[in-house]
Image (cartoon, coloured by chain):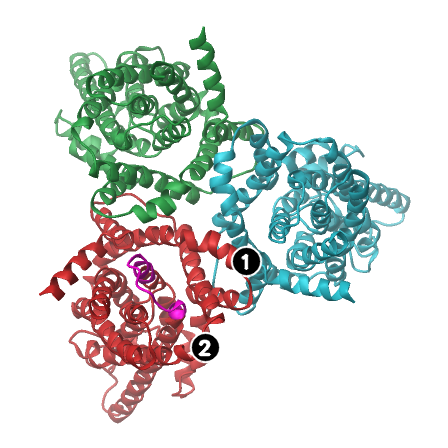
Chain colours: A green, B cyan, C red
Amino acid sequence: MDFLSNFLMDFVKQLQSPTLSFLIGGMVIAACGSQLQIPESICKIIVFMLLTKIGLTGGMAIRNSNLTEMVLPALFSVAIGILIVFIARYTLARMPKVKTVDAIATGGLFGAVSGSTMAAALTLLEEQKIPYEAWAGALYPFMDIPALVTAIVVANIYLNKKKRKEAAFASAQGAYSKQPVAAGDYSSSSDYPSSRREYAQQESGDHRVKIWPIVEESLQGPALSAMLLGVALGLFARPESVYEGFYDPLFRGLLSILMLVMGMEAWSRISELRKVAQWYVVYSIVAPLAHGFIAFGLGMIAHYATGFSMGGVVVLAVIAASSSDISGPPTLRAGIPSANPSAYIGASTAIGTPVAIGIAIPLFLGLAQTIGG
Amino acid sequence: MDFLSNFLMDFVKQLQSPTLSFLIGGMVIAACGSQLQIPESICKIIVFMLLTKIGLTGGMAIRNSNLTEMVLPALFSVAIGILIVFIARYTLARMPKVKTVDAIATGGLFGAVSGSTMAAALTLLEEQKIPYEAWAGALYPFMDIPALVTAIVVANIYLNKKKRKEAAFASAQGAYSKQPVAAGDYSSSSDYPSSRREYAQQESGDHRVKIWPIVEESLQGPALSAMLLGVALGLFARPESVYEGFYDPLFRGLLSILMLVMGMEAWSRISELRKVAQWYVVYSIVAPLAHGFIAFGLGMIAHYATGFSMGGVVVLAVIAASSSDISGPPTLRAGIPSANPSAYIGASTAIGTPVAIGIAIPLFLGLAQTIGG
Amino acid sequence: MDFLSNFLMDFVKQLQSPTLSFLIGGMVIAACGSQLQIPESICKIIVFMLLTKIGLTGGMAIRNSNLTEMVLPALFSVAIGILIVFIARYTLARMPKVKTVDAIATGGLFGAVSGSTMAAALTLLEEQKIPYEAWAGALYPFMDIPALVTAIVVANIYLNKKKRKEAAFASAQGAYSKQPVAAGDYSSSSDYPSSRREYAQQESGDHRVKIWPIVEESLQGPALSAMLLGVALGLFARPESVYEGFYDPLFRGLLSILMLVMGMEAWSRISELRKVAQWYVVYSIVAPLAHGFIAFGLGMIAHYATGFSMGGVVVLAVIAASSSDISGPPTLRAGIPSANPSAYIGASTAIGTPVAIGIAIPLFLGLAQTIGG
C-alpha cells in the first residue's frame, strides 16, 4: 500500500515539474486552438543546445571516468535497440490491416532515441536529486543507431524475399493470366521500391543491405552530430567556461520551451492517426512502457553486476521508452522509402512521445525511488 | 516647483533606463537608415518568453494571495476597456475625413493592451524599486478582451444600422433612380462586408453580434495564450526552477531587444500615417495620455478604497495608455473587415506605442513617486 | 628555447579554448558531412548581441576614460586599414591570372574588420587574464571604414584610368578596325560598370569617387550599426543592468555557436576557392599574419609611447589580421560591382577567417605573453 501511495504521489508531483507541465500545457493550448507558434528556427537551436550540452556533459565525464563501467550498459543499449525492431516485426506487423514494412519502420522509430525525451529525464533526475553517471547520455547512439540499422536491414530483407516469391509465383502463373499479383493486404505498387538507393540494391539482386551508409546517415543527423560534437569537445577541449556559463544554466529553460512545442505537435498529429490502423494506437501506448520495462530489467542486472546507478537505470529505461522525433524519420524515409511516414511519425509524435515523457519517465523514476530508497 | 523639478529629473532618468533608451535607439538607427534587422522568429520567441514570464509571475502570485483584492482593479480594467472604445466613437469618429468604422477599430486597438508596453512598465517599476501586486500583470485580459469585443460589437451595430437606413432610403428612391447611394465621405463599397463572417451576420438580418467567437479569438492569440499558459502553469504546476533560472533573469535583456525592434518599427510606420487623416496623429498622441489619466484616477480610488498599491496604479494606467501591437490587429481585421488596417495599425505602432512607452510610463511613474513618496 | 616551448604550449592550450575548439569542431563536422544547421536568424541575432555587447563595453568605458589615450591607436588603425589595400594592390594584383579589381576588393575585405574575430580575441584575452583597454573594441570602425573606402576609391580610379586609356587606344585604332579591345587578361565586359551607381560616376566623366556614401553605407551595415548603437547607449544611457544580466553573461556562449557556424561555413566555401587563381590561397594564408605583424609593431610603438596595454596591442593586431565577413561584402559589391565576389568572399571566409582566429589570435596572444610576461 505504501508502495502504491508513494508512487502515486511521486507521479502527480512529477507532472507538476516544469518539464512535464509544459508538455501538458502545450497539448492543452493546442486543444484550445491557440494561435501560439514557436518558430522552427528556435526549435532547431534549442535542440542543438540541449544535445550539445548532453554531449559536453558526457565528454567531460568520460575524460575523468573509468570507461569499463560503461561497457555493460552500452551492450544492453545495443541489444535493446535491435530487440525493439524484432518485437514490432512479430507483434505489430502481424495485426490485421498493418503493412509489414510500416510496422518495421515504426519499430525502428520506437527503438531509436529522442534527445528531448532523454533531456527531460535527465532534468527530472536532477530535480529529484537522484544521482546518475554523467556519461549516461552517451548511451544514446548505442541504442539509436542499431535500431535504425536493424529496421532498415530487416525491411529490405523482407522486401527482397517478397519480391522473389512474387516473381516465382508470377512466372508460374504467367502462362494463364496477366493479372497483377495481389499479396494479402499490400498494394504491390507501394511495396515496390520508390527511391533510387533501394531500387539499385534490389535490381542488382544484391540481398545484403549496405550497413555503413545507414550508420553514417544516422551519425550525420542534426541531433546526433550535435551530441557527438559535444562529446568530442568535452573530451579534447576545455569547454568548462561555456558549459558552466551558458549551456548548463539555459538547459532547463530551453527544455521547457521544447516540451511545449512537443505537446502542441503531439496534439496536432492526432488527426493523422485516424487515417492508419488502430493497432498503431495500441502499439504506441503499450510499446514505450514494454520497452522501458525490458530496459529497466536489464539495467537492474547492470546495477547488481557492475554498480550501474539507479539513476542510470532510469536513463536506460527512458531512452528505450522514447521514440525518435528529429533524426529518425529522415533516415527511415531514405532507408525504407516504401513505408508510409504518416503511420510511423504519427504514432511516435502523437502518442509515443507523450507516453514516454508523461507516463514512462514518472513511472520509472518512481520505481527507482521505491526500489532504491 | 519641487514637484516639477523632481518630476523632470525622474523623467530624464527614466529615458536613460535600458528599456526606454533601446526604444529611442531603435528610432534613431532606423532614422539613420541602418540595415540592422532583428529576425521575425526572434521577435516571436521574445514575445512568448516575456508574456509567459508575466503569466508565471501572476499565476504564482495568485496561488498565494487574497484574490478579493483583485476584484476592484479588474472591474475598473473592464470599464476602461469599454470606455476607450466609446471615447473614440464620439471623438475621433466625428472628425472630418475620418471613417466611423476606422475610428471604432482604432479605439478598439487603443483599448486593447500591449504586452511589451506592460513588460516595459513592470521592468521600470522594479528598477525604481516601486512595489506592485504580482498579479497586476493579470489585469491585461480584463481590459484587452472587453475593448476588442466592444469595438467589434459597436462597429457591427453601426454598420447594420447604416445598411438598413441606406436600404430604406434606396427603396424610397428606387422608383426614381438606379444610381448608387452616396453616404457622405464613405465609399459604400468599402463599408460593405468584405469577409464571410461579417457578411453572414448582415445577410441573415441578425443585428446581434456573436460575442463568444470574439472572446475566443482574443484568448487564442499568441500573446494572450502565452500569458494564460503562464498563469495556468504558475497556478497548477511548480515552475519555480525554470522561472528563477530562465524566464526571470532573461526578461530585461530580451525586453531591450524588443524595445529596439519596436522603435525601428515605429519609425518605419510613420510614412503610412501620411496617407490617413491627420486626426489619427492627434488622437494617437492625446489618447494614450488621456486613457492613462482616467485609469490613474480610477486606480487612485482603488488605492484609497482597497489598498491597491501605487505601483499597481501605474500598471493600470500604463495598460490603459498602451495599444495592442500583436494580438489586437488580427482580431480586429477579422471582426471589422471593412475598417482600414493602415489607419489603426499605423496610428498605434508609429505613435501610440512610442507615446505610451516613452511618455506615459515615465509620466505615471513620476506621478506615483511624487504622490506616494 | 624556453620562448618557443612556452609559445607552443600556449598555442595548443588556446586551441582548446571554447572559442577556437568550436571553430575547429565546425570545420570537422562539416568535413564529416553533418546535417547540422544553425538557422540564419539565430546567426543574425548572435551577431547583433555580440556587437551590441562590444559597443556597450566600449561606450561605458569611454564615458569613464581619458580619450587622449585612444588617439594614437585610432590613428594607427586608420593607417593600417589604408595600407592593407595598397599592399594587395601591389602584391596580389600583380600575380598572374589575378584581376586587378578583384585584388583591390580582396584587399578591402582583409583590411575591413570581422566583429566575430574581434569577439573571439577579446574572449581569449579575458580567459588568459591579460588586461586591455575597455575601449579597444571601439577601434573597429577606425580600421574598417578607411579600408573599405580606400578599396572602393582605388578600384574606381583604376577603372577610370583604364577606361580612358582604352578609349584613347580605341579612337587611335578606330579608323583601321572595329574589333573589340582586348586588355590583357581582363574581359572588357566584366571590368565595365555593372551597377547604376558606378556607371553614373564614369558616364559623367567624374574621376572623383564620392567618399561619403561609402562611409554611410559602412556605418549602416548591421554589424557596425549594432556596435555604434551599443557605444551610444553606453555613453548616454545607463544600460548597466541589461549589460550585466544579459549581454555580458551570454557573450561567450553565443560566440561559441557563432564560431561553430564560421567553421562550417569556412569548410563549405573551400570549393569556391578552386575556381579562382591559386594566388588567392597564398594571399589569404600570408596576409592575415603579415597585417597582424605590422599592427603588432605599430601597437608596440603605442605601448612604449603612450602606455597602450599589451592586451590592446593584441586587439589591434587581431583586427588587422581579421577580414570582414558580414558588413564588408555587401559594401564592396555595391562599390566595386565589377569585382568577382566569389574571389574575395571565398578567400576571406574559407581561409582568411580561420587563419585569423585559429593562428593569428593564439600567435599574437603568445607573443604578447612572452614579451610582456
Image: magenta residue range: C121-137
Q: Disc 1 to disc 2, how far (Cα)?
A: 25 Å
Judge whether B33 appears above or below A111 on screen. below
Dividing the picture into quarters, in which one does residue C365 lie?
bottom left
Quadrant occupied by the C terminus of chain A: top left
Residue A323 appears left or right of B328? left
- Nearer the observer, B94 or B220: B220
Check disc 2 and give the amino acid type.
Pro
Q: How many marks?
A: 2
Check disc 1 and give the amino acid type.
Leu
Q: Main secondary structure of the magenta part?
A: helix
Query: Can you identify the residue that label 1 sits on?
Result: B260
Q: Share a chain, discs 1 and 2?
A: no
Judge whether C332 appears above or below B163 on screen. below
What residue sits 43% from the left and 39% below the top? A254
What residue sits 42% from the left and 29% below the top? A127
Quadrant occupied by the N terminus of chain A: top left
Which secondary structure lies at badge 2? Answer: helix
| Place of residue A65 in the rendered image (x, y in percent of width and height, measured from the top left) | 20, 34
- Nearer the observer, A308 or A31: A308
Q: Can residue A33 be seen from the camera position used here? A: no
* 1 or 2: mark nearer the eye: 1
Query: Can you identify the residue that label 2 sits on?
Result: C213
| Place of residue B119 in the rendered image (x, y in percent of width and height, measured from the top left) | 61, 48
Q: How many other residues sit within 10 Å of disc 2, few (<14), some (14-19) or many (≥20)?
A: few
- Nearer the observer, C330 or B32: B32
